[in-house]
Amino acid sequence: MAAIDDAMPVAAGAAPSRPRLLALLWPFAALLALALLLPLTGNEYWALIATRACIYWVLVSGLNLIVGFAGQLAIGYVSLLTVGAYTASVLAAGNLLEPLHPALALAAAALLGAVFGVVVGLPALRLRTFYFAMTTLGFATIVTQVALAWQDVTGGGIGITGPSLPAPFDTAWGFYYLCLALAALCTWITGNIARSRFGRALVTLRDAEVAAEASGIAKPWLLVLVFLLAGALAGFAGGLFATLQTYITPDAFTFDLSLLFFIAVLIGGRGSILGPLLGTLLLTLLPEVAAPLAAWSTFLYAALLLVIVLAIPGGIASLIDPRNRRKLPENRAVIPRPELLPALLGQQPRHAGLTLRDIVLAFGGVRAIDGLDLDLRPGEVHGLIGPNGSGKTTTLNVISGYYRPETGGMTCDGSPLPAGDAVGRAARGIARTFQTPRVVGEASVLENVMVGATIEGRAGFLEALLSLPRQRREERMLEDRARQALQAVGLGALADIRADRLQHSELRFMEIARALMLRPAFLMLDEPAAGLSTDEIKRLDQLIRGVSRQGIGVLLVEHHADLIFEICDRITVLNLGKVLAAGTPEEIRSHKEVVSAYLGG
Amino acid sequence: MLASILASGLAVGAIYALIGITYNTMFATSRVMSFTAGQLGMLGGVLGSLFALRLGLPILLALPLTLAACALVGVVTEYVAVRPVLKSLDQHLYVLSTLALALMIQQVTALTWSTEPQPFPRLLGIGEGIWDEKYWLPVLACAATIIGLEYLYRRTLVGRAFLAVAEDNFAARALGLPERNLRIASYALAGAIGALAGFAGGQLLLAFFANGPLLNFYGFVPVALGGLGNNRGAVIGGLLLGLFQQAANFLVGGIFSSVAVFALFIIVLLAVPQGMFGAPAARRV
């Protein structure tokens, strides 16, 4: 079995990122160059189409973060375009207040768009998918009705003139260049978010929500930030749209447009910026080529949607993703390098340990945990064994806050550990892995691992938006540490591969790397050896010992008795939610009941 | 005025409740919320008008034809938009596939029927004022549907098989129940219920292609408020929604009634995410 060449020095980890960046950026640069040259055609009709594409992209780039990254199905986003268009037009025309400068009216449109973006998104904070799809749809019908009925402000069915910008933006090409610049800006800022810890957190919430929570990612706050941004962009796009149309009526904001935005993201593919950009261009140009089919446009969009969903759920992005093509070494093996752990983890400060006292948790009538006491000490490996249904994983879930016990208390480093607060565990230095690995298949191994240290990020959303120095510094730090962690667990050579191409055993080691990113005080492993070969279990054994030597307390839920007795300093045997025996491996080995029940003999 | 609010409120409420039951019937066997629910209601009105008014068929023939046609649409939904995405239910692709199919249905209706609301015939010619048949027919249809479903679920073998599949898909299959055929049957049944909603409410809503999205939303609200898959919740929620909406309609005017319903919907969902009669979320870890 050929081992992966993992000898690459740690410091060289960040070096190959420069050419990768170029490879990522050239399609954008090419598109921008084409767009800049467009005025050479001298055809003002093309200016109109291209301006429209730019305006749509301003909206879609924000929507992409919601649909493509956060996985929330916001279908009726035309409503925010409508809100923005009417806000800008009404304020510029002075129907409600004194007439405002067009630039201020556009800013107000963005502001109101942001507010409504959050209002429409509120249900998504607690419920997923269909509810959010419905509220965005419901909102879309209401906005049009209000625009029709509020005649003295919106002009009702007759409509209202859009804001007209001052020179040099009052010509077709002047306005085009403005919109192009804004579209480029939106590409840049949403790209910045996508490649920041915020973007990774969104994707993790989408595909592996429990893993995101265990890494300390709070969903509501993150989603509100993204709804604000996407709403503002949509509202602003609405203002630009009204300027381009010069005159707007409620008829201009058909459901077709909503579909166009939504499908552009889906054609483009999830978790990509380039894909949806191409999708937007494609869908803006399509009606121009297929003009005779105008009456059937909704039907065609819908049919297109159905085909994409059924045939290529990955979209354009999955077809052009270089991470899909890179060949993987055959016959590879995960060779952890525990000697790298001290550099990665440092030495844990003194810690009073984790204690559970008298924990009781019942599911319906079944007492899954029935008066459990448990003490985890720093630097020790603590094994938790017992038959199926004895409450091992349940205990782990109580500690990591997914279950709220009925009675009993927990303390961590001397102070109480609140029950049922899964998101807060990372900040208390508690990291974990899962029985079935919870990973983002579409993200690279490196990105998956970087998620583990999300809570260490200090740079805010605005800093990430503009990629300010502190943000860039933190990203470099995170990437270096993630590469270090991957080398320590033996996956260094696979860092840039999509995670869904890894084998099951490799995903287990990847989860450990993600947990180590936190430099935790306690690491909880839920059956880490399940599905591993004998050789792999031996290497896992060394890795776990190495981790505990750095002063980290390890809680190991496991069925492999060999592994448990080999590396554990202390073992607790559970049966029917109660402690059957607790002590050192020698004591457990000679414990009568344990021996007769589980060990045979 | 109170009498008119009650009459029209209960009438539209019954229509919303029936659409809610349509959602639930499809959800029960497939765990899929389908956007076609509202379109089935729309088709009930359009096809009813087509058969009874344009083709001049007697009501006794037009009703079964409408129900059968929508049952067929239900079956097509299952084949085209539900079955292919069932294996990856957690990705929620069904939201997109059923939306796409719903829009295709709507657009074909708009292009082949009419983009303007068309009249729906008087069915029985009984009653006037607030006792007009257009107000009590939907309520009657709703009551008949509930009684029919109760009978089906409690007294017949097929109905019990439905319940078994709804309760635990895998266990039902392990028992040898024909899970796939039951799913197809439930989509046909849902199609007929949706059609009945549109047919009974035809005189109120008219035969209009754009009723689909409206019914989709107002039919979903009682489901969301009552809890997914809970027919009792859907009926109570639907009737309350109808009364609330019509009261707001009479008191503050049409647009603001939709705003009020929307606001109520969001507030209740934030307060009780699983609906008022819904079950708590399944375990995740």
Image (tube, coloured by chain):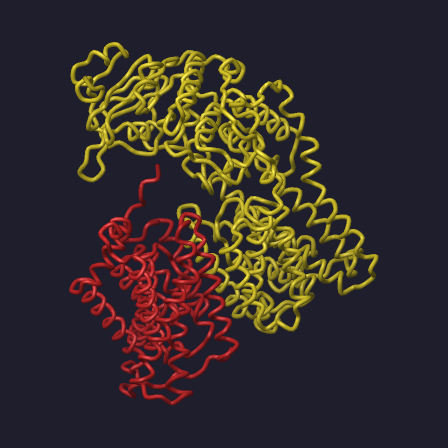
Chain colours: A yellow, B red
In the displayed orientation, state which residue is furthest to the bottom: B56
Instruction: Provide residue A41's location: percent of width, then percent of height.
Output: 82, 60
Up/down of A367 relative to A181, above or below: above
In the displayed orientation, state which residue is furthest to the front: A1
Give the residue drawn at x 58%, y 21%. Answer: A5
Q: Is residue B159 left or right of residue B265?
A: left
Which of A541/B90 is in front? A541
Which of B100/B222 is in front? B100
Up/down of B166 relative to A249, above or below: above
Instruction: Provide residue A444's location: percent of width, then percent of height.
Output: 55, 35
Up/down of A212 relative to A353, above or below: below
Up/down of A172 relative to A445, above or below: below
Give the residue drawn at x 38%, y 62%. Answer: B78
In the displayed orientation, state which residue is furthest to the top: A586
Instruction: Provide residue A148's location: percent of width, then percent of height.
Output: 54, 70
Q: Is residue A431 left or right of residue A69?
A: left
Which of A6/A51 is in front? A6
The image quarter containing residue B161 is bottom left
Q: Can residue A98 be seen in this view?
A: no
The image quarter containing residue B191 is bottom left
- Quadrant the C terminus of chain B occupies: top left
Give the residue drawn at x 37%, y 61%. Answer: B220
- Quadrant the N terminus of chain B occupies: bottom left
Instruction: Provide residue B89's location: percent of width, then percent of height.
Output: 40, 50
How many tags in the picture? 0
